[in-house]
Image (cartoon, rainbow, N blue to C red):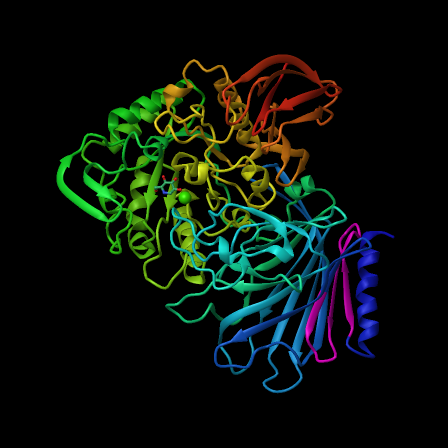
Amino acid sequence: MNKPTRFLLIALLVLALSCQSEPTLHLESPNGVNTLHFRLTEKGEPTYSVSHGDELIINDSKMSFDFKGQESMKQGFTFVGFEERPIDETWGMPWGEQREVINHANEAVARLQEKQDPKRRVNIYFRSYDDGVAFRYEFPEQGGVDSLTIMDENTEFQLTGDHTTWWIPGDWDIYEHLYNTSKVSEIDAISKRDHPNLASTKIPENAVNTPVTMRMESGTHLSFHEANLTDYSGMTLKVDPENLTLTSELVGSDRMGYKVKRALPFKTPWRTIQIADKASELIESNLIVNLNDPNKLGDVSWFEPQKYIGIWWEMHVGTSTWDYAGSQDMGTWTNDGRPHGNHGATTENTKRYIDFAAKNNIKGILVEGWNTGWERWIGFEDREGVFDFITPYPDYDLKEVVRYGKEKGVDIIMHHETSAAPRTYEQQMDTAYALMKDLGIHSVKTGYVGKIIPKGEYHHGQWMVNHYRKVLEKAATYQIAINAHEPIKATGIRRTYPNAIAREGLRGQEFNAWSIEGGNPPEHLPIVAFTRMLAGPIDFTPGVFEISLPLKPESQVNTTIAQQLALYVVIYSPIQMACDFPENYEDQPAFQFIRDVGVDWEQTKVLNGEVGDFVTIAREERETGNWFVGGITDENAREIDLSFDFLPEGASYNAVIYKDGSDAHYRDNPTDISIEELEITHSSTLSINLAEGGGFAISLMKSD
Ligand code: NOJ
Ligand code: CA
């Protein structure tokens, strides 16, 4: 049956049934593999379920809302209409994991109204894709109400088994927890909430953050998340371990006393379930970006995907500081105005980094600690007005480093640590971005360390969701791209605002410098690739070469040097840092991979992978046709068999293979690396040994 006919039949079935009792909508994906079923129960409760082939993925699940000053909306509904439409379009990513994205789905809207007064109305939009399903609520204009105050949204996801789950605790302020692996019935997020180095968190329930990924007994993989988080609160998922149910739990605001307030009409973010037969397909899914609106900014070619270095790792490992004078010791501050001589962001140091970048095919340099205010950064309640984003410290000549960078072909990446005082930042955005525009600077790393001021707001609540959006919109008017740390989660907004280039929103490399609990464990990134990375680009900041951290004898990064190289391919971002000191890259043959590796991709193929164990990804660079492959493993050594049949037939490539040396081990021998050159074609195969905590990287340069 051709696809439009099948879709029409679904619609007809619905209409026929509607004459007798409340109908059931069955919305199939274009190839028929996923179906969303929707009906009203006898009590008129909106209820959906999801199947994947013959397998039930989500059992009958209810959808309801609690409001301020009104009855909850959960039952007594009747259908007042249906509409459906096929979606089939191809859109281009200005930068990304692939040049073109196919957005192919079937969409239906069910229009519902309460039978009794006040006869409130809600519309539910459903989409079935071949890589998952999604739905969102619309509160249309209706008599008697002009806005809604939501106390909570209760969207259920009734699981059909006790799936293996990779999760981080629900948190209203930060996503930087370590991942846990457990059955749904064993999720205990409350006991996982404290961490000495995280801004204090708030988890009112046994809830997890999204994306949360699961593997069913059958091998089917699911990932729950949201798309197009706009003017709404972030969603955590409350876990009922006994009944194997997840229920949406929105991030709140103690200041406001509600979770979301919106004028009518409005639509909520999409609630999404990615569905895949194998783990690797989750990474290839475009569901999240496809559920967002098309590009609103038009041409963003002023932003160039790039590798960058930074005056950054030195502060994290402690050889220099962000602040210039006095001393700042977590909450106590003395400043006699005299420089202490250990400031990282000096003109001279920046020029040294620029020289290094210019020699090594690196186009950007991030300079943190360049502006006044760092003496009062961490631990202060009173953080409004501390940073001003235009005043450099006396030893940093901003104009001169910009000039010097331009001469050498290296862009300065601006840094704005807001210290979680968004009102101060909003007051200064115009001035700060105008300065950047004057200087020809097109990207900024923002930061939101600490508890949000005003008190009672949280990083992931509606008020901050709107702040992060304001920043994107304002920055776009100055042709500025944003890399946010301590951000709101990625929900595919980069499709609409392609100046949202990357963000943190996970436990990044920095934790390895502080080495809390021995740093990130080797399984961290093989989990991240199938969880956080499904949401969007990650500023993880790979590239540690001095793995044993000589300045911190008790600490070490849990990686091998070959794995650090692999991350440039595996962990996607259009900006990729080479985070280590320039001197640690000097005379290192492995650094050639970082010089060569691309940052903007024509296409991406996930060659293999299992969540938490390993993953191998191949990406073709735009314009050059060169390919790069990266593979990483957890704490287990393993052999990976590679077939290069993703390469075009008839072409030949000069390949350089960077792999763990035969004695490599993430703890005992992390820098043992073997580098080999080969000629590779479409029909080549290769077997590569990855050490415990290791990886490999391959550059494939077209030779004809
Ligand atoms: C936390 C960010 O994640 C880190 O990259 C940055 O160096 C500090 N904040 C200072 O802004
Ligand atoms: Ca951080």
Task: Identify which residue is drawn at 60% across, 13% down.
Answer: 676
The image position of residue 590, as x and y in percent, is: 50, 18
Instruction: Decide which of 310, 659 is in the foreground and name it.
Output: 659
Answer above or below: position of 297 versus 15: above
Percent across and percent down for residue 180 are 56, 47
> Which residue lies at the image location 21% right of the left edge and 48% below the top edge?
332
Residues drawn in magenta: 23-48
**Residue most toward the bottom?**
117
Residue 436's quadrant in the figure? top left
Magenta residue check for 227: no
Left or right: residue 522 versus residue 450 is: right
- The residue nearer to you, when weighing 128 against 402, is 128
Above or below, comparing residue 20 to residue 225 in the picture: below
Let me know if residue 96 appears in the view. Answer: no
Q: Farthest right residue?
A: 1
Residue 27 drawn in magenta: yes
User: Where is 473 relative to 24, above or below?
Assistant: above
Q: Quadrant of ligand 1?
A: top left
Can see residue 273?
yes
Q: In x, y percent, where is residue 451?
A: 35, 55
- Residue 327 spot, x, y in % from top left: 20, 40
The quarter of the image holding the C terminus is top right
